[in-house]
């Protein structure tokens, strides 16, 4: 088998004294992949490389495979985050985890499960604000919130602020203004992210939610509306709470490192 070129380069840099042992060790850890049987290859170096943990999508996975993946990651990395988890899948994971001493927390509203044997991540100083237009959007907002918290951020929320009655938004925004970044979840016509972006001086990430019916229902109208926004916003896919939350945490952590926000 040919040598891993990137690993070879790292070792040469260490040999020649161009990088320290600590830097070489961290970089090598960032390349770490572990195989589980013949069905999975998990990326245990993602947190070192990208500043975010390996997050497992439960949807479509064989329950036994899913439980084995979760136990392996949690046992090796200390914590494992799983999205789109059904109550039945959560029960199976909890049963397997109980045999290993790994604790499991299932947050049913956001359909997110966190398994681990290590403390919650240390706070980075990053602050993420998450807003929903309605209560139907909270399930997606909760997915974003949990991911941002697992990446060390403080998360401040304002749920059900509405868009049809704009006067409801202003008092909801006030306690959130110290955030480094705003995540705004909205279904139906998806107006709220553009409105928020016109009122704050921080990045805004819009998450269209699959709420709404009829023509362009199930989040399609919300996605189209956000993509056509006159305000400057970033937009992720329909119901993509993980993506929105992780992207927001990256921005917030960068802002915290520069001493921005409050």
Image (cartoon, helix red, strand yellow):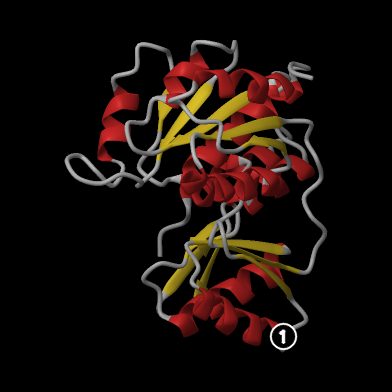
Q: Nearer the viewer, residue 225 or 128?
A: 225
Against 107, residue 53 (above or below) is: above
Q: Can residue 11 be seen in this snapshot?
A: no
Residue 103 falls in image quadrant: bottom right
Q: Nearer the viewer, residue 179 or 258?
A: 179
Q: Position of residue 145 (x, y in %)?
A: 62, 45
> Taking 180 as reference, is 203 left or right?
left
Q: Position of residue 218 (x, y in %)?
A: 28, 47
> Taking 161 as reference, is 4 left or right?
left
Badge 1 density bin: few <14, some 14–19, many ≥20, Cα 10 Å? few
Residue 157 falls in image quadrant: top right
Q: Nearer the viewer, residue 119 or 8?
A: 119
Name the residue carrying label 1. 98
Against 233, residue 6 (above or below) is: below
Q: Which quarter of the rendering shows the N terminus?
A: bottom left
> Residue drawn 69% across and 24% down?
176
Q: Can residue 80 be seen in this snapshot?
A: yes
Q: Position of residue 7 (x, y in %)?
A: 55, 49
Q: Which quarter of the rendering shows the C terminus?
A: top right
Q: Position of residue 115 (x, y in %)?
A: 68, 68
How many numbered marks, from 0 up? Answer: 1
> Taking 98 as reference, is 133 left or right?
left
> Residue drawn 56% across and 84% down?
92
> Residue drawn 26% across and 29% down?
224
Mark 1: secondary structure: helix
Residue 101 falls in image quadrant: bottom right
Against 232, residue 38 (above or below) is: below
Q: Nearer the viewer, residue 66 or 261?
A: 261
């Amino acid at each position: 088998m040919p040598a891993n070129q990137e690993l070879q380069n790292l070792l040469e840099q260490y040999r020649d004294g161009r990088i320290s042992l600590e830097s070489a060790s961290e970089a090598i850890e960032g390349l770490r992949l572990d195989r589980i049987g013949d069905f999975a290859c998990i990326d245990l170096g993602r947190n070192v490389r990208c500043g975010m943990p390996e997050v497992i999508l439960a949807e479509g996975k064989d329950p036994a495979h899913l439980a084995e993946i979760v136990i392996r990651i949690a046992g090796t990395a200390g914590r494992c985050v799983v999205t789109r988890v059904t109550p039945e899948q959560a029960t199976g994971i909890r049963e397997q985890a109980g045999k290993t001493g790994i604790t499991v927390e299932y947050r049913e509203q956001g359909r997110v499960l966190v398994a681990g044997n290590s403390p919650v991540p240390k706070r980075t100083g990053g602050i993420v604000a998450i807003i929903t237009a309605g209560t139907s959007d909270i399930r997606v907002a909760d997915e974003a919130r949990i991911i941002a918290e697992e990446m060390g951020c403080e998360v401040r929320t304002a749920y059900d602020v509405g868009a049809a009655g704009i006067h409801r938004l202003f008092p909801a925004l006030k306690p959130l203004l110290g955030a480094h970044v705003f995540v705004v979840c909205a279904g139906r016509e998806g107006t709220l992210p553009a409105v928020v972006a016109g009122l704050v001086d921080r990045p805004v990430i819009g998450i269209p939610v699959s709420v709404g019916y009829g023509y362009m229902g199930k989040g399609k109208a919300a996605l189209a509306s956000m993509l056509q926004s006159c305000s400057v916003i970033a937009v992720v896919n329909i119901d993509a709470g993980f993506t929105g939350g992780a992207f927001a945490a990256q921005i917030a952590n960068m802002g915290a490192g520069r001493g921005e926000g409050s």
